[in-house]
Image: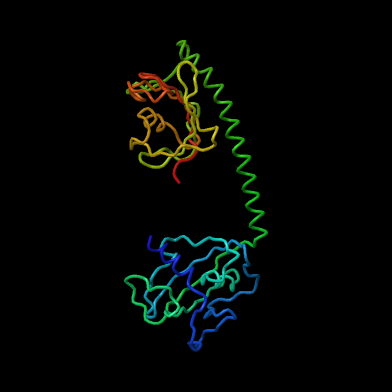
């Protein structure tokens, strides 16, 4: 949270960087008033308005004490240069750079909107920038369009797969209700069929897992599903975030695995049921697909 406050604090420093100061040794002043010094300067294009930029930053006081840095988290800043960049020190500095460049900005304390709480800043702060990469506006927009197209295709594929599985599950439930379906039974009373064990990462207790599902009553009524929304359910097994039958059954699978779970009422919604969708003391059946394990 402290890093986020500093990012906002530095990004919106006002335009006048060092009004009334002479240029310090080794530094230059840009046409728009930035006091800067390059450490690495490469030939090549520079990011313009609308470009997506990826950079690291750090902020130091005059005695070189580190106040904050994106490197502390290991995650560089990735953002878009807005149409109004005039008041943003970091992004104005980034616009001066080519890919691979690094520079330092010196910011006068007199121009700071406020002094960060608990920090000893006398006259200046120093903002170090390293431009890792950027996408010009046109390329960024093309990338976004490609990604949007891929997402739309993926949504259709997920929904189509869900419709197919809904029909298959309906037939499976009919066989189960007639006693003609072979299942495995766990000591808890959970019955299940593993269709695909999965070949990816195993499901681990208390670690996030993303699961697609179709929930059906024994009469074939679908009471819930994720495929139509193309959004998998995220939960952590073993923490009681889902019903007991899910907690137990999902751990038979790895990423990419598929199974049907036949969950007795005592491992599901019990004597209370669930609203008007699941009657009291109902056995419920789920087709589940482990879409992803972990973030």
Which residue lies at the image location 37% right of the left edge and 71% below the top edge?
116
As drawn, 1 above or below 188: below
User: From what the image shows, is residue 255 above or below residue 264?
Assistant: below
Quadrant assignment, res 207: top left
| Rendering coords of residue 41 (x, y %) | 58, 76
Where does residue 109 sit, x and y in percent of width and height? 42, 79
Q: Residue at x 45, y 20 (%)?
A: 217
> Is 40 left or right of 8, judged from the image as shown?
right
Q: Position of residue 44 (x, y in %)?
A: 65, 71
Residue at the image point whose x is 33% and y is 38% from the top: 239
Q: Is residue 35 above or below residue 47?
A: below
Quadrant location of the N terminus in the rendered image? bottom left
Where does residue 76 sit, x and y in percent of width and height? Answer: 49, 62
Query: Quick one: 41 or 271, which is closer to the camera?
Result: 271
In this view, 215 is above or below 124: above
Q: Nearer the viewer, residue 14 or 39?
A: 14
Q: Is residue 262 left or right of residue 272?
A: right
């Amino acid at each position: 949270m402290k890093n986020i406050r500093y990012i906002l604090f530095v990004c919106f420093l006002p335009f006048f960087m060092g009004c009334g100061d002479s240029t310090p040794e080794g530094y230059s002043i840009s046409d728009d008033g930035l006091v800067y010094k390059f450490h690495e300067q490469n030939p090549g294009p520079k990011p313009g308005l609308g470009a997506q930029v990826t950079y690291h930053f750090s902020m130091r006081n005059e005695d070189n004490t580190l106040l904050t840095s994106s490197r502390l988290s290991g995650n560089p800043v990735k953002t878009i240069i807005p149409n109004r960049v005039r008041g943003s020190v970091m992004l104005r500095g980034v616009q001066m750079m080519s890919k691979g460049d690094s520079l330092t900005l010196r910011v006068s304390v007199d121009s700071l909107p406020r002094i960060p709480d608990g920090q000893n800043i006398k006259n200046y702060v120093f903002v170090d920038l390293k431009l890792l990469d950027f996408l010009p506006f046109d390329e960024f927009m093309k990338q976004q369009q490609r990604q949007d197209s891929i997402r739309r295709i993926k949504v259709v594929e997920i929904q189509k797969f869900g419709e197919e599985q809904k029909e298959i599950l309906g037939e499976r439930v009919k066989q189960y209700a007639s006693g003609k379906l072979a299942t495995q039974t766990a000591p808890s009373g959970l019955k299940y069929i593993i269709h695909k064990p999965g070949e990816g990462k195993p499901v681990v207790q208390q670690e996030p897992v993303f699961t697609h599902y179709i929930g059906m009553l024994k009469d074939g009524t679908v009471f819930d599903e994720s495929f139509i929304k193309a959004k998998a359910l995220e939960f952590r097994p073993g923490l009681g975030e889902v019903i007991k039958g899910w907690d137990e059954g999902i751990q038979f699978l790895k990423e990419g695995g598929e199974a049907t779970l036949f969950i007795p009422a005592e491992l599901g919604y019990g004597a209370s049921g669930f609203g008007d969708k699941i009657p009291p003391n109902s056995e419920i059946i789920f087709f589940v697909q482990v879409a992803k394990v972990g973030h």
